[in-house]
Amino acid sequence: MEYFDKQAIDAKVASMLPFQHRWHNRFHLEMPFGLINDPNGFAWYQGEYHIFFQWNPLGCVHKNKCWAHVRTRDFVHYSRPELALWPTDEHDKDGCYSGCGVAERKRLRVFYTCNAKDEQGNRSSSQRFGTLQADGTVKKEEFAVMHEPEGYTAHFRDPYLFTRHGKQYFVIGAQADEKEPRGTVLIYRETEDGWECLGEPATRLGQFGYMWECPNLLHFGPFDALIFCPQGLEARDYDRQNVYQAGYIAGHLSLDGMAMLQHTKFQELDHGFDFYAPQVLNHEGRHILIGWMGMPDRDDDYPTREEGWMYSLTLPRELTLRQGHIYSQPARELRALRIAETENTVTADSAARVESDLSDGSEILLNIKLGEAQNVDLRLRYGLEHLTFHYDRHAQTMTISREGMKNGARGVRRFRLYVDEMLSMHLFVDKTAVEAFFQHGEEAASLFVFPEKDIVPSLEVEADAPMETVTGTIWQLDAFRYEGC
């Protein structure tokens, strides 16, 4: 088991803020060194949002999993990231895996998966609570579940707490141990004698991948949504195109009947190249999501590894459920990043091409009344390189192409996007992270680009016939501000 020196690691982080490398993002959470992945322990406590996330401070590989921690009141100003939880004993010696957070009256607790392997490489998983201390560390406490129940493998992880009718439950990702491994989730209920396994909520999905990770159970008025990350699905023409997916089913959860009733088909939360393991906090009537900008088993796609760090977290998003579909919009607090004096209004009538300069970090809000246009390209141009969003009005599809970029992974992603007359796009363009929202949040896409040259991108909108109108606004965005920087 590796040795973790919190004081030295925290000091190293502080010495490397603010970021200097041209590929480091300005308004996405990331670390100056090491590999980060799943957001964890997302909670509101004593007037602040607490965001934990998986971090290997010792290298850019998926091992030595710890939890880093930041605090923010407004998703703009942040505490300096610090090491909060790391492997210390026989139960979590091979990683403090993902989990959640819950604010109680006088303490902030986390609930995470302990991962350990024996000399033969056999995994054991257990679920443990901890409490955040004044010194920024998590004090490890009691175990809720020491082992997976009979009939399930040790791929048993990522607990997410929720309450119903005054009782506390958690949902956890699992793998049924059958002739062919089957992904699912299990639900546990707190009792006077501990945590009772209620079993799997039945769905109509059947054999749907070999493992479900990172579940969240959300309540939208009379409806429920089960968010999870299935592994082992085959790609299709217009969805499931990443190696692993992040999505949801929406319906009605019956805890008495242990079934997800009248649920929708599985729908993806994000159609970009780089989105996985989201975690959602319900605070003051808002469902706020933060995801991992990255993808398991695709480390070679990210050239920042050669510079000593990998991956980011997404911007916070607000989720709403409408007619069985989750819409996501950038959290309203992010408007504070706009530098007002840079506001640039875009207006064009009957034009087949519109261009605009951008900044080091930009927010782009566009409404394109298509008119006669059948095909529209929105390009972010980095000198001779470009990232393209192509909308095909006849096929009703959006295609995102990184084929015009030189560094990192390329490829395309396609998804259905139904537009009548007005195509709406809302983009956040950071140094390497790009997040796009379509049709007022009906769909979203997160992805990385790694421009070869240190160049500020420009915006191009081009169609195969005159667009009736192109209107919108572009702002330069400020960087996140860390304490002491």
Image (cartoon, rainbow, N blue to C red):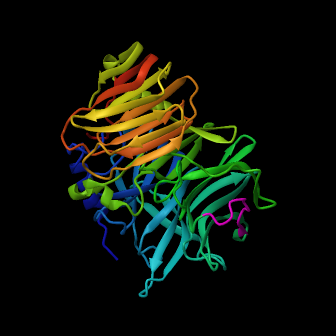
Q: Position of residue 464 (x, y in %)?
A: 41, 25
Which residue reaches farthest right? 257
**Foreground residue, 83 or 479?**
479
Tell me where residue 395 appears, x and y as whole percent.
54, 37
Does the rendering let one see residue 109? no
Left or right: residue 238 compared with residue 18 = right
The answer to if 205 sits in the magenta stretch is: yes
456 relative position to 200: left or right: left
Q: Could you say which quadrant of the image residue 401 lies in?
A: top left
The residue lying toward the viewer, choosing from 5 and 27, is 27
Q: Is residue 388 left or right of residue 469?
A: left
The magenta stretch spans residue 86: no
Q: In this orientation, does residue 181 appear? A: yes
Q: Position of residue 46 (x, y in %)?
A: 51, 43
Location of the N terminus (image quadrant): bottom left
Magenta-drawn segment: 197-208
Image vertical order of residue 116 relative to residue 313, above or below: below
**Is 463 above or below relative to 188?**
above
User: Magenta: predominant secondary structure element?
Assistant: loop
Q: Position of residue 58 (x, y in %)?
A: 28, 65
Image quadrant for the C terminus? Answer: top left
Residue shown at 72% from the left, 40% from the top: 221
| Vertical position of residue 43 compared to residue 460: above or below | below
Residue 10 in which image quadrant = bottom left
How many discs mark residues in the rendered view?
0
